[in-house]
Image (spheres, rainbow, N blue to C red):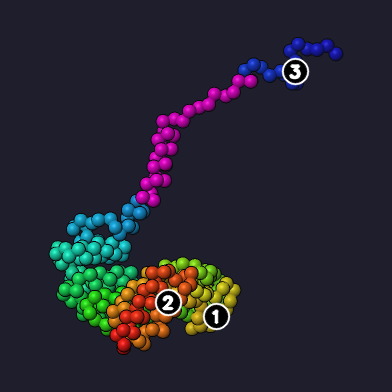
Amino acid sequence: MPIDSNMVHPNPAPSEEAHQPAAKRGMSRKQKILFFATGWLIVLMPFLFWWNTWFGRQLSNQQLNEYLHDGKKPRHIQHALVQLGERMSRHDAAAKQWYPELTRLAGDPVEEVRNTDAWVMGQDTSGTGFHETLLKMLQDSSPMVRGNAALSLVRFGDASGRPQIVALLQPAQIAAPVAGRVVDADQPGTAIRQGGLVAKLQPADASQHIVEIRSPIPGRIRSVTQTGASVSAGTEIAVVDPASEQVWEALRALYLIGQLDDLPAIRPYERELPEIPDHVRQQAMETERAIRARGK
């Protein structure tokens, strides 16, 4: 059969042009702008988050006043309180204009605000109404607020909060609010903040929502009922040891007002254990010596 000159060869030889790589297209101006904008956002967003949550950022008098009254953003109130506390510690006379706000915030519904407020009122023992307000805060529903109020009262030379200070040395024993099954739990040894999630509990009544078990104090989980276990209402579900900073502050206060009855709570912190920092152990031993020297 003769070959038709017009027939296309089934495997044509590649032309010279086929060997040429396709020219790379550069990014358009719009793509470049979008690329750099995305890069800036990646860097900027963490900075903005830090800037808005860092309590060390200095506030003007106008900002401080606005933040103290920002009921929709408790962290703004805390920020203002921290800044005010620093001014008070420097004996800034201008800080006195906000003292009525400190006594008002002692009744704020947000625990973190009351906690910070109790600490701030201890920065100036001349503040009108501070002493009386702190005494009332010894009955607060939060153990941390009670503890901070007690620590501040020591600055007033008032030992009324000694039981609350001793309680700061004790681990938090968390009970199951309802009967049910643990469906999730953290691990022993895990550091946890105040209000941090320790475990989740599915109530025996399946129609009820999962209950979140949270720590009332900052510290480290000593023990927790593990996933799959069933618990009864009121039984211990977790134990959290107090944070070192909390223990250290309590020991310093008891150095001044502690009694012999407090020694059993102090002595565990004199032991040489990895979880007890040296400065805490040293403070515990000094506190016991001071108490024994007082002989009561």
Kind of residue sitting beneath label 3? His
Q: Point out the stretch of residues depicted in magenta.
A: 18-47
Q: Secondary structure at mark 1?
A: strand
Residue 36, position in %: x, y? 41, 38
The numbered disc on residue 231 is 1
Compute the Cα span from label 2 to label 1.
34 Å
Residue 1, position in %: x, y? 85, 13
Q: Is residue 201 magenta?
A: no
User: Which of 94 and 279 lies nearest the eye of the viewer?
Assistant: 279
Would residue 143 be seen by someone viewing this image from the given angle? no
Read off the residue under disc 2: 270
Q: Residue at x 15, y 67 (%)?
A: 96
Secondary structure mostly seen in magenta is: helix
Would residue 13 be seen by someone viewing this image from the given angle? yes
Q: Is residue 34 magenta?
A: yes
Query: Quadrant location of residue 164?
Result: bottom left
